[in-house]
Amino acid sequence: MKRFVITSCFLIISILSCLAQMDIKVQLTSNPFDSVKIESYNHDKNHKISYTQPYSSEVSFKDKQSLPAGFYWIIGDTNKVGSFLISNNKNQKFTVIITNDTVIYQGSDENTNNVKYISTIQTFGAQMRALDAEFQQAQSSMPQYMLRVLADSLTSKAKRINKAQDDYQLSVIQENKGNLLASIVQLARSIPEMPQEYYQNRDLYQKFIVEHFFDNFPWSDPRIFDTPIADDKIKEFCNIIYQLDRKDLDTFVVAALNSARVNEQSLYRFYDKVEKILGSNISPYKVEHTYIKMLQNILSYPKLDEDRTRRCSRELKTINKNLEGDLVPNFRIVMANGDTTSLYDIQSNYLLLYLQHPTCPTCREVRGKMANFPALNTAIAKGNLKVLTVYFEDDEQVWKNYLKSSEANPSYLHGWNFDQTIEDNELYDTRTIPFMFFLDKDKKVIRKDLLYNEIEDYVKKYGLN
C-alpha cells in the first residue's frame, strides 16, 4: 500500500508537469541576485505579465497558462540580464543559460536563431562603420579629386553591404516563417534608397522618409506590438512628425492607419501608441493638426466599437475648437479694479491669453518663468502686446487672494470669468492648464496651445520687442 501511494504521488507530479503550458528554466552562472524575474515587455497594464522566484543558480518558471506571444525580459533584482521571444502557446519549454554577457538557449530554435541574427547584423553594422571611418580619415589627408574617387568606391561597397544584409534578412524571414522573429526582422529591413536629387531638397527628403517609414511594418502580425523594436519604430516616427510639424505629412500618418486596418488588433494597438504621443493632452509632443486627421480616420473605421466612437467623437469636437485662423469665442470677465468687461473689449495689437488657476503648481511655475522673459517684458512695456490671465472657476476667494499676492504680475491684465461660461459652455479646452493663445488684434488665433518656451520666439517673430 505504501509503495502504491509513493508511486501515485510520482505519477501525479509527472502528470502535473506535463500539464504545464509554460516551463522555462533560467541558469545564472555569474552574479547572484536576491530574486529572478521574467517580465513581458509591454507598458500596457492589460498585457503585462510577471513571474518572480527567489534566486538560485537554476530557477524554474512553470504555469498551467502559456505565456502570450511577445518579448520577455529576464531580470535579476532590477538588472536586465537576458531576454527571449515567445511566438505561440507551443514550445514554451526551454532553458536559458546566462553567463556574463553570453546567452544560450536550449530547446528554442527561434531564440537561438535570434542570437545568430543579432550577431550577424552587428557584423554588417561594423562593416559600414569601418567604411565611414575610412572616409573620415581620408578627408583630412587626401586631395579633393582623390577623395571623390574614394567616396564613389566606398559608396559602391556600402551598397553591396546593404544588399547582402537585406538578402540575409529575407533568408531569416523565410527560415522563421510564422514566428515572431520573422516579423521583427521584417520590421528591421531598410526602406528603399531615395533618389539622389532628394538629398539636395529638404522637403522631398523629409517627405520620402515619412512616406516610406512603415514600408516594412508587419501589420498582419499584432504580436509585433509587444516588442521593443515596434515601440522604438513608432516613437521615432512620432518624433519626426513632431519635429517637422508639416500638415502635408499628415496624409502619411493616415496611410499608416489605413495599413493597420488589416485587423482590429493592429489598428487599435498602433492608434493607441501614436495617440499617446501625438494626441494626448498631456504629451509635450502633441501635434494638433495630425491628431485631428487621426481622429477623423479612426471614426471612419466601420468596425469601431461604441466606447471608442464616443471618446474619439468627443475628442474631435473638443480639439476642433479655436484652431489657428479662427476667432476665439468672447466671454465676460471682471477685472482687478472691479470693472466688468469682455475679452473683445480689450484692445491690443497682440494678446497673450493665459487660461489658468491661480494656485495650480504648473501655472505658478510658468508665470514665474514668464516674468523673466526679456523680449516679452519689453513688448509689454512698449505697448505692443498685452498679457491677460483668466481664472474661469467659481471660487471668488481664490481669485481675490491671487490679486492680493505678489504672483499677480502688475504688468499683466487679470480677469475672472465670473459667470463660468468658459467651462459651462465649453468655449475652450481647459482639460490641462495653463492653456495659452497668441491672438491678433481681432482675436484671431495665431498660435493655439502656446508653450511657455515658445513665447519669446513669437514675440521676436512678430517684432514686438
Image: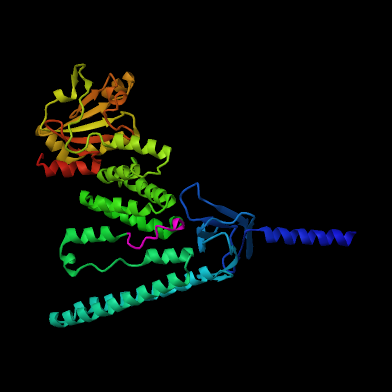
Query: Does residue 448 appear left or right of residue 283 in this picture?
Result: left
Residue at left offset 31%, top offset 23%: 424
Q: Whole-percent x and y of residue 86?
A: 52, 61
318 or 276: nearer the eye? 318
Q: Whole-percent x and y of residue 302?
A: 37, 44
Residue at left offset 50%, top offset 60%: 80
Q: Residue furthest right?
A: 1
Query: Does residue 144 appear left or right of residue 301 in this picture?
Result: left
Residue at left offset 47%, top offset 74%: 116
Quadrant assignment, res 334 = top left
Q: Whole-percent x and y of residue 428?
A: 27, 30
Residue at left offset 33%, top offset 59%: 214
Q: Whole-percent x and y of residue 60?
A: 64, 61
Quadrant assignment, res 127 = bottom left
Query: Does residue 181 appear left or right of residue 389 in this picture?
Result: right
Quarter in which the C terminus is drawn: top left
Give above or below for 234 relative to 103: above
Q: Which residues are magenta?
A: 214-223
Q: Residue furthest front?
A: 302
Quadrant assignment, res 342 = top left
Give above or below for 144 relative to 241: below
Give above or below for 69 relative to 283: below
Is 450 inside the magenta-drawn segment? Answer: no
Quarter in which the N terminus is drawn: bottom right
Query: Does residue 148 appear left or right of residue 63 in this picture?
Result: left
Is 217 inside the magenta-drawn segment? Answer: yes
The reply to whether residue 325 is visible in this rendering is yes
Q: How is the image coloured?
A: rainbow
264 or 70: nearer the eye? 264
